[in-house]
Structure formats: C-alpha cells, structure tokens
C-alpha cells in the first residue's frame, strides 16, 4: 500500500516533464481565472499539510470554476520534490484530460 503514493508522485513528475502541470496556488488561480484553452486546470492536487486558509482558497476557487480537487497524502515538500521544485508546494494542477483521469484513479485507490 505504501507504493501507491509514490506512484502518484512519480506520475506528477511525468506530468511536469510533459509540460502539463501548473505549480503553486497563485498560478493555478490565475489559470482558472484566465480560462485559456490548453492551460485550464482539470484536476488540482493539494498537499496534505496545507494551512486552513490555503485549503479554503483552493477549494473555494475550484468549486467556483468547477474543477475537481483531491488531497494527496504527501506533504508540500514531497510534492515539490516530485515535480522538480525546491521548497514547498501547496498544490499542483494537471491540465491534460487523460493524465488527470489516470492520476485521479491513482489517488482514489490510495485514499
């Protein structure tokens, strides 16, 4: 059961290398507001250790724009490391439909 979160993190790294990932809450919110074709967040993955304020910001924005949000079992540092960033990330968003579907299935099975 421990390898499932690792699998989803590895898949997020693949999404990042493919250029189908938006990293960070401000960029995700900007992409939802702009609504450009090809860069619309289809699935938002939130880190397990986000603050209540950040959690509310993410969930409210996703509810308004009709975007699904799932909470990962990984903390912000693990999430950042998986996608090739240093520091901490509160959330990432997948912009490709097939990748979002595959990641959704991985996260739902592990949680």
Image (cartoon, rainbow, N blue to C red):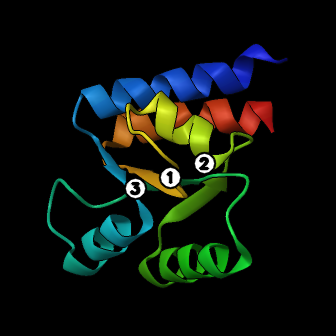
Residue 63 x, y percent position in the rendering: 55, 79
> What element does badge 1 sit on?
loop
In this rendering, which labeled residue sits more in front, label 2 or label 3?
A: 2
- Marked residue nearer the N-terminal end (2 or 3): 3
Residue 42: mark? 3
Quarter containing the C terminus: top right
With 60 as the anchor, is 42 left or right in this view?
Answer: left
Residue at left offset 49%, top offset 32%: 81
Residue 89: mark? 1
Comparing 27 with 1, the one in front is 27
Taking 31 as reference, is 34 above or below it?
below
Comparing 9 with 50, the one in front is 50
Residue 22 x, y percent position in the rendering: 32, 52
Asked if labels 2 and 1 touch by Cβ distance under 8 angstroms, the answer is yes
In this rendering, which labeled residue sits more in front, label 3 or label 1?
A: 1
Residue 77 x, y percent position in the rendering: 59, 42
- Marked residue nearer the N-terminal end (1 or 2): 2
């Amino acid at each position: 059961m421990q390898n499932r979160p690792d699998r989803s993190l590895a898949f997020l790294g693949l999404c990042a290398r493919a250029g189908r990932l938006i990293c960070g809450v401000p960029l995700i919110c900007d992409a939802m507001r702009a609504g450009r074709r090809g860069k619309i967040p289809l699935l938002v993955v939130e880190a397990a250790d986000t603050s209540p304020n950040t959690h509310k910001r993410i969930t409210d924005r996703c509810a308004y724009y009709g975007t699904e949000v799932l909470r990962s079992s990984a903390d912000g540092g693990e999430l950042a490391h998986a996608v090739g960033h240093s520091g901490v990330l509160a959330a990432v968003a997948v912009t490709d439909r097939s990748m979002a579907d595959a990641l959704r299935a991985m996260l739902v099975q592990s949680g």
